[in-house]
Amino acid sequence: MKKPRLPSMELLDNDTVAAWIFLNPALILLILFIIWPIAYLFYLSFTAGSFTSTGIYLVGVKNKGQ
């Protein structure tokens, strides 16, 4: 008869650890090339700046009305 497994032991199962090892490079690339640029562009949409002047100024939602 099999022993009942505790739910906490399923988190450390060999298959689960192997899955996370294989998923980590893909998740890192996803964050690096998809999620980070979207978050940075969202931040930039609330700022004002130009290539000729120095600094970036937070303007809030004033950019959204233009």
Image (cartoon, rainbow, N blue to C red):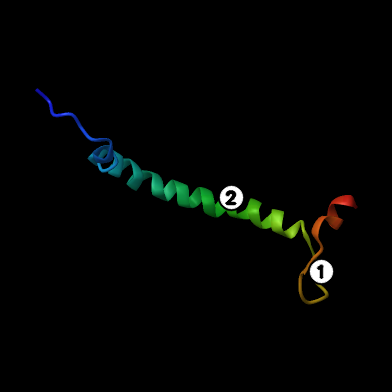
* Name of the residue lying farthest toward the left: 1
Q: Nearer the viewer, residue 66 or 29?
A: 66
- Residue 31 place in picture, x, y as percent: 53, 51
Residue type at mark 2? Ile
Residue 40 horizontal side relative to residue 19, left or right: right
Vertical arrangement, residue 59 with respect to residue 23, above or below: below
Q: Earlier in the sequence, mark 2 or mark 1?
A: 2
Crowd tier of the residue under label 1, counting other residues whose Cα lies within 10 Å: few below 14, some 14–19, many 20 or above: few
Indicate which disc residue 38 carries.
Answer: none
Which image quarter: residue 44? bottom right
Where disc 2 sits, the SS reads helix
Question: Residue at coordinates 33% horizontally, 47% vertically from top-left?
Answer: 21
Q: Mark 2 or mark 1, which is nearer to you? A: 2
- Whole-angstrom CA distance, mark 2 to mark 1, is 24 Å
Pointer 2 with pointer 1, Cβ within 8 A: no
Q: Which residue is mark 2?
A: 35
Q: Nearer the viewer, residue 21 or 63?
A: 63
Where disc 1 sits, the SS reads loop
* Name of the residue lying farthest toward the top: 1
Residue type at mark 1? Ser
Question: Residue at coordinates 23% horizontally, 41% vertically from top-left?
Answer: 14
State the count of labels: 2
- Residue 1 place in picture, x, y as percent: 9, 22
- Residue 56 place in picture, x, y as percent: 76, 70
Question: Residue at coordinates 44% horizontally, 46% vertically from top-left?
Answer: 26
Indicate which disc residue 50 carries.
Answer: 1
Residue 17 horizontal side relative to residue 42, left or right: left
Question: Residue at coordinates 66% horizontally, 57% vertically from top-left?
Answer: 40
Vertical arrangement, residue 63 with respect to residue 30, above or below: below
Vertical arrangement, residue 57 with respect to residue 42, above or below: below
